[in-house]
Image (cartoon, rainbow, N blue to C red):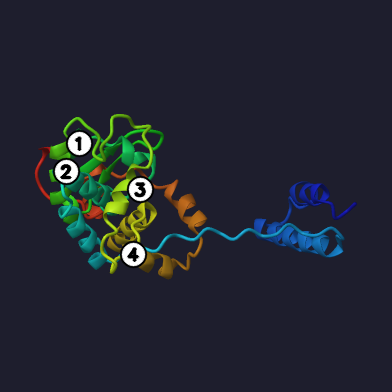
Amino acid sequence: MLLRPAVIERFVLMGCRTVSPATRRTLATNLRALARRTQADPQPTPLPRERAKPPYSQAEIAGYLRLAAAQPTEARRMRATALLCLGAGAGLVGSELRHVRGREVTRRCGGLLVVVSGPRARAVPVLARFHGPLCSAAAFAGERYLLGGESPRRRNLTDALGAALCADAGLPRLEAGRLRATWLCECAELLGLKAFMDAAGIRCSQRLSDLVAELPEVEEETAVALLGGSGGGRGPA
């Protein structure tokens, strides 16, 4: 009875009010471990933690851009280029890719931004080396969706475009998740995130989210400069 989960939780919450939070966590961990040893029932099988996808190298991204430029029609060239630039240049993935129209790529605050709608609406600075090809794709799309189609509910667009960029056997399979990982790694490098985490001894992303919640909002112009999105100019792309 004493080692039931409900009893342990009540003891930690109500019976340990006079000790420090670290001591309470230690007591809870030790009691749960003792309970596991005394239980006859099999324990739940731990599920593997999903790991971040590996990023593409700059040479691989350059190879994909060359394949995109070699597509047989202008529409296919522009849509394949947009997929690469939105993924590796702005970190968009999933339904966000399908909803972006050409007019939502805009020059502002000294850089090029993609205005993302939906549950996580935001303006994302595009990495500077993707400005040129993304502007061309946005100008071609205009009011239409950058990846093509007539409805944001359409499916398998990224799969079809990705298949068109797998003609080179020397390049790995194109995945939207890896394109986003490429953007994340490049932004983390620009911000010096590894140096900060190494110096602070932080290994858990939960701690970072706790810290970020206490920080003031960042101005758009500052975000453009920090995230490698500077390119000069204002107005529509």
Measure how far apart labels 4 and 1 are at the Cα level. Answer: 28 Å
Report the mark closest to the observer, 3 or 1: 3
Out of 2 and 136, give the one closest to the viewer.
Answer: 136
Q: Is residue 66 left or right of residue 47?
A: left
Report the mark closest to the observer, 3 or 2: 3
For mark 3, give the secondary structure: helix
Amino acid on which the number 4 mark rests in the picture? Pro
Amino acid on which the number 3 mark rests in the picture? Asp
- Residue receiving disc 2: 137
Residue 157 x/y as whole percent: 33, 42
Measure how far apart labels 3 and 1 are at the Cα level. Answer: 20 Å
- Which of marks 2 and 3 precedes in the sequence? 2
- Residue receiving disc 4: 172
The answer to whether residue 237 of the structure is visible from this angle is no
Out of 62 and 91, give the one closest to the viewer.
Answer: 62
Out of 14 and 135, give the one closest to the viewer.
Answer: 135
Q: Is residue 4 left or right of residue 79?
A: right
Q: Are marks 1 and 2 in contact (CB under 8 Å)?
A: yes
- Which of marks 4 and 2 precedes in the sequence? 2
Report the mark closest to the observer, 4 or 1: 4
Which numbered circle lies on residue 102? 1
- Residue receiving disc 3: 159
Residue at screen point 30% across, 45% down: 218
Residue at screen point 73% across, 57% down: 44
Amino acid on which the number 1 mark rests in the picture? Gly
Residue at screen point 25% across, 54% down: 226
For mark 2, give the secondary structure: helix
Measure how far apart labels 4 and 3 are at the Cα level. Answer: 14 Å
